[in-house]
């Protein structure tokens, strides 16, 4: 049995390819929404609740998982560490799959790399002007709590729950752009110009996540990129290419 921890981005792509040669698959996602997006694929079981260490160990034993593929969000470092530990304690193979880093290939001197959101205040102190946060609603309230001198505009999903959370947390509607990405360069250009953006806070979400268009717009409009680095995790075996992952899984 193959086990998968999936985020919504890569999940559909992975299951589409794996279903071409097997249905002996069990999947764990962190949310019911994530499970709904994957329900069209053939799997033996779909867990849609967050699991702790014991939860993952029980999941492995119950379904007799031999190989566990972790394709969770690259910034879900603690979740990956939990899966790694569960696999080690149950003596099964752990495989990491994630998008190749886009920023490793970017030569742009206006990129400022940070290891945490708490470093933003120091990083932004010499930047005069508005900041665009594109790291999602889960980080918007944290950024808002830092007491930055800059006006920060948060680009988030157009969800009632998200907007309610942000406004109740003290972020005004004037500082919220609710729109679903990823976006082409024209939309990024328009937002940068309309809001007079001088720096963009982003994650390394890979080319598929629209980060290339974001960086190109920043370069053209002379805006800095504030990159929040991925958490450092010792994954062991890592695949960045889906074809290579599928070839490996066919052999196990």
Image: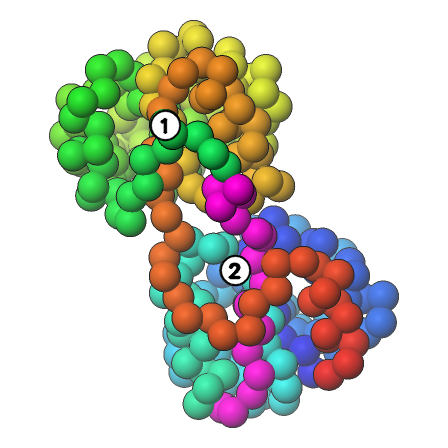
Q: State which mark lies toward you, 1 or 2.
A: 1
Marker disc for residue 72: 2
Q: Which residues are magenta?
A: 90-105
Q: How crowded is the residue under tag 1: few (<14 C-alpha within 10 Å), some, or many (20+)?
A: some
Check residue 192 for magenta coloring. Answer: no
Residue located at (37% from left, 48% from top): 229
Q: Marks 1 and 2: CB-CB under 8 Å?
A: no
Q: How crowded is the residue under tag 2: few (<14 C-alpha within 10 Å), some, or many (20+)?
A: many
Kindly tell me whether residue 111 is visible in this rendering: yes
* Residue 17, quarter of the rendered image: bottom right
Marker disc for residue 110: 1
Q: In front here: 184 or 4?
A: 184
Q: Is residue 123 left or right of residue 230?
A: left
Image location (x, y in percent) of residue 214 = 51, 27
Image location (x, y in percent) of residue 71 = 57, 62
Q: Secondary structure at mark 2?
A: loop
């Amino acid at each position: 049995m193959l086990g998968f921890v999936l985020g919504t981005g890569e999940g559909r792509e992975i299951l589409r390819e794996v279903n071409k040669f097997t249905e002996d698959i069990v999947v764990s996602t962190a949310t019911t929404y994530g499970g709904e997006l994957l329900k069209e694929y053939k799997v033996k079981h779909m867990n849609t609740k967050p699991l702790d260490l014991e939860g993952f160990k029980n999941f492995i034993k119950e379904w007799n998982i031999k190989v566990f593929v972790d394709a969770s969000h690259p910034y879900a470092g603690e979740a990956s560490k939990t899966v790694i530990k569960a696999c080690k304690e149950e003596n099964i193979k752990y495989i990491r799959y994630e998008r190749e880093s886009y920023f490793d290939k970017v030569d742009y001197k206006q990129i400022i790399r940070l290891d945490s959101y708490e470093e933003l205040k120091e990083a932004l102190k010499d930047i005069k002007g508005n900041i665009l946060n594109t790291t999602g609603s889960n980080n918007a309230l944290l950024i808002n709590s830092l007491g930055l001198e800059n006006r920060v505009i948060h680009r988030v999903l157009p969800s009632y729950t998200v907007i309610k959370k942000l406004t109740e947390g003290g972020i005004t509607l004037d500082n919220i752009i609710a729109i679903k990405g990823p976006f082409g360069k024209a939309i990024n250009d328009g937002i940068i110009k309309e809001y007079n953006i001088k720096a963009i806070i982003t994650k390394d979400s890979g080319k598929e996540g629209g980060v290339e268009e974001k960086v190109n717009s920043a370069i053209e409009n002379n805006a800095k990129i504030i990159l929040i680095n991925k958490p450092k995790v010792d994954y062991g075996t890592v695949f960045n290419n889906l074809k290579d992952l599928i070839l490996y899984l066919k052999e196990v």
